[in-house]
Image (cartoon, rainbow, N blue to C red):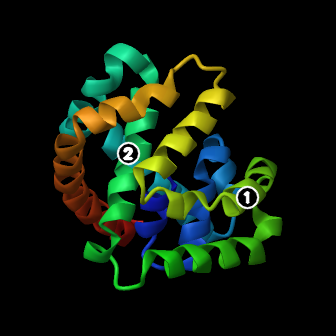
Amino acid sequence: MNFLAHLYLSDNDEEITIGNFIADAIKGKQYLEYPPRIAKGIVLHRAIDTFTDAHPTFRKSTAKLHKTHSHYSGVIVDVLYDHFLAKNWIDYHAQPLADFVQDFYTMIQKNFDILPTRIQRMIPYMIADNWLLSYATVEGVDKILGQMNMRTKGIGKMDKAVITLHEHYTEFEAEFTSFFEEMIRFSNQKLREL
């Protein structure tokens, strides 16, 4: 799951959202240095990633990309799944996506000082290019994957992934829909356990 899905799965809780958002920049037991609910968000993020990577539907999606994109396939599917969440947002959330995204940008700027340096550096670009809202269109996904491709020096050929998205669009969408229903249940259960 990529940024938008992690935010959605944070149960509209500000501190859990912060933890879920910054988790990739927190290594090992560093999460224990954060306030308890932010730490809970970090642990939730890790559980979501573990569940996702092992899920047969997610693997079915990555298989379509593996020949061209190798181990970057999972990263690409994370972005594609965020696309389908954004595209079908009205099916998952009562608040319009644009408002949800703006509320997140406001909240994360308000909490800027607690963010790891790597995330602090990323935030201005994320907001300026409105990454979260851009997931809703294939053109936006293409742009994001192109930027990711440049950061990885073209090794994963992520700028070509939209070709496969077009070829298998209906399949990817069906796989996301099936997977995300299970993910919501898993995430809700994990939140209760934490």
Instruction: Using residue 102 as the reference point, say whether residue 116 is left or right of it.
Output: right
Residue 101, compared with residue 54, is above or below; it is below
Residue depicted at 57% across the width and 35% down the height: 146
Q: Secondary structure at mark 2?
A: helix
Residue 162, image x and y in percent?
40, 35
Dot 1: few (<14), some (14–19), or many (≥20) neighbours within 10 Å? Answer: some
Measured Cα–Cα span from mark 1 to mark 2: 21 Å
Is residue 118 toward the left or the right of residue 81 in the image? right
Question: Is residue 26 in view from this perspective?
Answer: no
Out of 137 and 184, give the one closest to the viewer: 137
Viewer-side residue, 78 vs 48: 78
Check disc 1 and give the amino acid type: Ile
Which label lies toward us, 1 or 2? 2
Image coordinates of residue 139 in percent, x first then y, are 47, 48
Q: Is residue 142 above or below residue 183?
A: above
Residue located at (67% from left, 46% from top): 25
In this rendering, the answer to whether 107 lies above or below 158 is below
Give 81 or 141, whichever is nearer the viewer.
141
Which residue bears the numbered disc 2?
80
Q: Residue 96: where, in percent of width, then height?
A: 42, 81
Q: Residue 36: x and y, percent?
A: 61, 69
Name the element at disc 1. helix
Compare marks 1 and 2 and give the one earlier in the sequence.
Answer: 2
Neighbourhood count class around disc 2 (C-alpha, 10 Å): few under 14, some 14–19, many 20 upward:
many
Give me the residue at 59% from left, 29% from top.
149
Q: Is residue 100 left or right of residue 186?
A: right
Q: Which mark is residue 18?
A: none
Q: Residue at x 55, y 69 (%)?
A: 17
Image quadrant holding the C terminus, namely bottom left
Question: The residue under label 2 is which amino acid type?
Answer: Leu
- Report the residue marked by disc 1: 123
